[in-house]
Image (cartoon, rainbow, N blue to C red):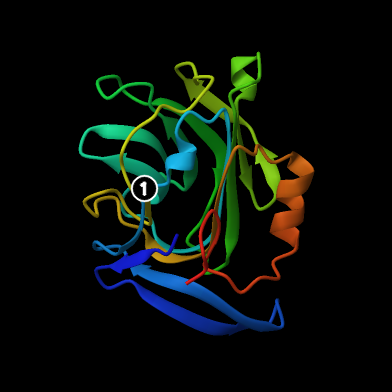
Amino acid sequence: YNGTLVGNAVVAEEDDLTLGRPRGYVDLDGTGDYINVGDITSLDGTALATWQCRVRINALAHDSALIGRAGGTDYQFRIYLTTTGRIVAEIWVSDISGPLKWTGTGVVSADAAWHSIAVVYDGSQGVVADRIAIYLDGAVVASTAVGTIPTTLRTIASNVYIGASEFGSDALNGDISDVLISPFDAWSAARVLSWHTNDGSNRIIAGEFTAS
């Protein structure tokens, strides 16, 4: 999948002294910029999924969307930051019910630094509390739950959006890179930590996507 830039979203690159090479990313200004990736049907009905990205936040004036799949009233999942920098993962079981919500205790700050975020979904877990794990900078963070996370993701016909919702609301004000969506695969804590630590790729969108 190749994402389509919407609004004033800009593909950029900078020299990263930590990496020792250039880093590619998308610059989003928080006023309607986002990436439309299109419909990823491999997410339908899966019991396993991993969503990851690296972000550098400029401001958190409102809830800031990272990755989500929704269209009109057809919702599947959404991952976003609150105004206090908490990571929230939402999953819907129907269009008319509110989302089931996991909120992590870790905080992402507007500190001019890159942070890695990962959400791992494993609906096969018998203990409901184990079906969602939220990671910040390679470490799992404690989370609180509202509702019961389902055993599989529902089937919908909607696009995946990065950096904003379907209509550009909750737009991310910052930079995003190394976005990864992996259906059918619940990453282990060791694998998430390895991905966080080995920040060696110069990709903007990965996993189910073709880098663009």
Q: Callout 1: helix, strand or loop?
A: loop
The residue lying furthest to the top in this view is: 126
The quarter of the image holding the N terminus is: bottom left
Image mark count: 1
Q: Position of residue 190 (x, y in %)?
A: 79, 45
Q: Which residue is mark 1?
A: 39
> Badge 1: few (under 14), some or many (20 or more) residues near its Cα, within 10 Å?
some
Q: Position of residue 207 (x, y in %)?
A: 58, 55
Residue 29 vertical placement versus 155 (above, below):
below
Q: Residue at x 66, y 53 (%)?
A: 137
Q: Classify residue 8 as left or right of residue 212.
A: left
Q: Quadrant of residue 158?
A: top left
- Please tell me which residue lies in front, 9 or 36: 36
Residue 185 vertical placement versus 53 (above, below):
above
Residue 85 vertical placement versus 199 (above, below):
above
Q: Classify residue 34 as left or right of residue 45.
A: left
Q: Which kind of residue does numbered mark 1 sit on?
A: Asp
Q: Residue at x 57, y 67 (%)?
A: 113
Q: Residue at x 31, y 23 (%)?
A: 98
- Please tell me which residue lies in front, 39 or 73: 39
